[in-house]
Image: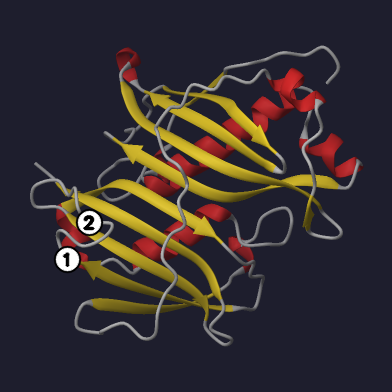
Amino acid sequence: MEGSTVRHFATEFAPRFYELNARRQAGPVVLLHYLEEAAVSHSGAAGCSLQELEGRGVGWVLNRWYIVVERYPVWDEKVSVETWPAAFDRFYATREFIVRGRDNTRMARATSRWIYLSVEKKRPLRIPEGFARAYGLDPERAVEHDFAALPVRQGEWNLTTSGKRIFAVRRSDLDGYHHVNNAQYVQWLLESVPEQTYDLAELQSLEIEYRKEVGYGGRVRVDTLALEPGAEGASALPEGGQAYLHSIEDADTLRELAVARTIWKRQE
C-alpha cells in the first residue's frame, strides 16, 4: 500500500451467454456483480486487497447503491467499468463507477457508500489515513447523489397497490463471508415487480440501502409498493414510467433488512 496512487481504475468484462436474461441482456444483477468485482480489483491494485484486510481483521461492507442505467450490455459486448473513490469521511467511503460499452459509449453510472469495520466486532472503524494515498481520491462524482435516507416502512401496505413475495435463503445466495450477497437482494426485489412492468419496461434507476444481515436458513419477505406519479420518490418519472418502493424484511422477525426504490422506463 505504501506509496501507491492508483486513482481511477478500469477493468473489462464480456457478458457470457449464461449471464443473459430473457432479453439477451446482462441485466441489473449482472451489472452489480461487475461493479463489485471492479471495486475488489481496484483494492488489490492499490495494495489493499481483501486478503490483506482480512489478515488485519478489517473489511468493507456495502451500505448504499445508486445506479442510473442508459442501456444494458448485450452478449459478448466488451464492457469497461471505471471506478474511483471520491471521498473518505470517518468510516464511510464513497466510490464512483462509469460503465461503457461498444465505441466507448456510456451505458451506466453509479455511486456507492461503504463502511470500514472490524470484522469480529462488526463495528465501524475510522478509515486509515494511508488509504487516501493508496487509492488516490478524486472528488468528481459519476452521478450526483447525497445518500439521503430512504423512507422507513410505516405499517402494512395496501395490497391493491403492492405485491408480496417470500424467499428462503439458499446456499447459493451466500458470499465468502456467509452472508447474502448484496446483489441477491436486488434479485429478490426484481422478482416482486409486477409482470406487466417487468415485461414492458426496463429498470432505469435503482437506489438501495442495506440495513441488516441475513444468513442461510432465513426467510425473506419482499413487499413492493407502486408509487403514484408525483408522490415522493416518483416526481420525475419518464413518460409511461413507474416507480416502486421495496421493503425487504426478515419474514419471521419483521426486521427490515433493506429498503429500495426503483424507477422503470417503458421500452420503446
Q: Mark 2: which secondary structure? A: loop
Image quarter hosting the C terminus: top left
Q: Mark 1: which secondary structure? A: loop
Relative to 196, is 94 above or below?
A: above
Residue carrying label 2 = 234
Relative to 183, is 79 above or below?
A: above
Image quarter hosting the N terminus: top right
Disc number for residue 252: none
Tell me if 172 is positioned left or right of 266 in this view.
Answer: right
Q: Residue at x 35, y 61 (%)?
A: 190
Q: Position of residue 153 (x, y in %)?
A: 42, 75
Mark 1 Cα-neighbour bin, 10 Å: few <14, some 14–19, many ≥20? some
Q: Are marks 2 and 1 in contact (CB under 8 Å)?
A: yes
The number of numbered badges drawn on the structure is: 2
Q: Position of residue 52 (x, y in %)?
A: 86, 35
Residue carrying label 1 = 228
